[in-house]
Image (cartoon, rainbow, N blue to C red):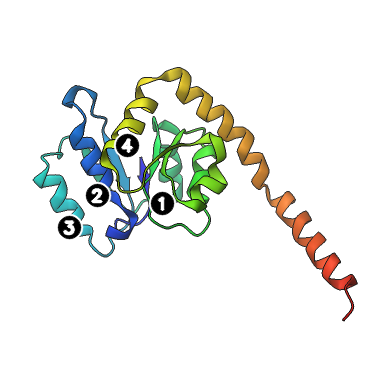
Amino acid sequence: LYVGRIELKKNLGVVLEALNTLPVEQRPKVVFIGKDGLGADQIKRQVTQLHLESSVKFTGYLAETEVQAWRKTATVMILPSRYEGFGLPLLEAWRAHTPIIASNIPALTEVGGDAVEYFQLDSAQDCARAIHKVISDQHFRTSLIQKGETRLKLFSLERMASQTYEVIRQCATIRP
């Protein structure tokens, strides 16, 4: 499962190339949820060029309740991004008890820690390796889910509020 805008900058082409390298009998179905953005037509053309129509589904925009239902039933969530500001999709996947495969960019590795199976950015071969590993190894998938549940606790609203208050308190006590 991928959730986000369907755009070239989201690096979705690497996922399609990865699928294409997997043997047909090991190829998972991938659902892309999100509005079309810049380059969506190119991404959809790539699906046709690689003959992946039976493995790929584009849903377009879905309401959050529908997205949550997809997250909860997904075998794995994939985030192939070249850039993320924070990595909120990781928290959303962990909340749904869904394991994650992600590109190894700093925002995702900082948030994800050891609770994500990473792949080298722009490497279809490494992405295919990660996909195969997570979907074929139930024990590994379960360990990612457990680690995600633990990591999710680090990002609670209460903790954020407490840390923000502490920074403000410290700033208020500093005199020029």
The residue where tag 4 is placed is 126
Q: Is residue 21 above or below residue 141?
A: below
Q: CA distance from mark 4 to mark 1?
A: 32 Å
Residue at figure coordinates x 39%, y 27% from the top left: 134
Rate crowding at label 1 as few (under 14), some (14 to 19) or many (20 or more) other CA atoms within 10 Å: few
CB within 8 Å, label 3 to label 4: no
The residue where tag 3 is placed is 42
Q: Earlier in the sequence, mark 3 or mark 4?
A: 3
* Residue 45 visible here: yes
Which mark's residue is nearer the viewer, 1 or 3?
Answer: 3
Q: CA distance from mark 3 to mark 4?
A: 22 Å
Q: Earlier in the sequence, mark 2 or mark 1?
A: 2
Disc 2 residue type (three-letter):
Gly
Which mark's residue is nearer the viewer, 2 or 3?
Answer: 2
Q: Nearer the viewer, residue 122 or 58?
A: 122
Q: CA distance from mark 2 to mark 1?
A: 25 Å
Provide residue 104's location: percent of width, then percent of height: 43, 45
The residue where tag 2 is placed is 13
* Residue 91 visible here: no
Disc 1 residue type (three-letter):
Ala
Which mark's residue is nearer the viewer, 3 or 4?
Answer: 4
Which labelled disc corresponds to residue 63?
A: 1
Which mark's residue is nearer the viewer, 4 or 2?
Answer: 4
Disc 3 residue type (three-letter):
Gln
Quick one: quadrant of the N terminus? top left
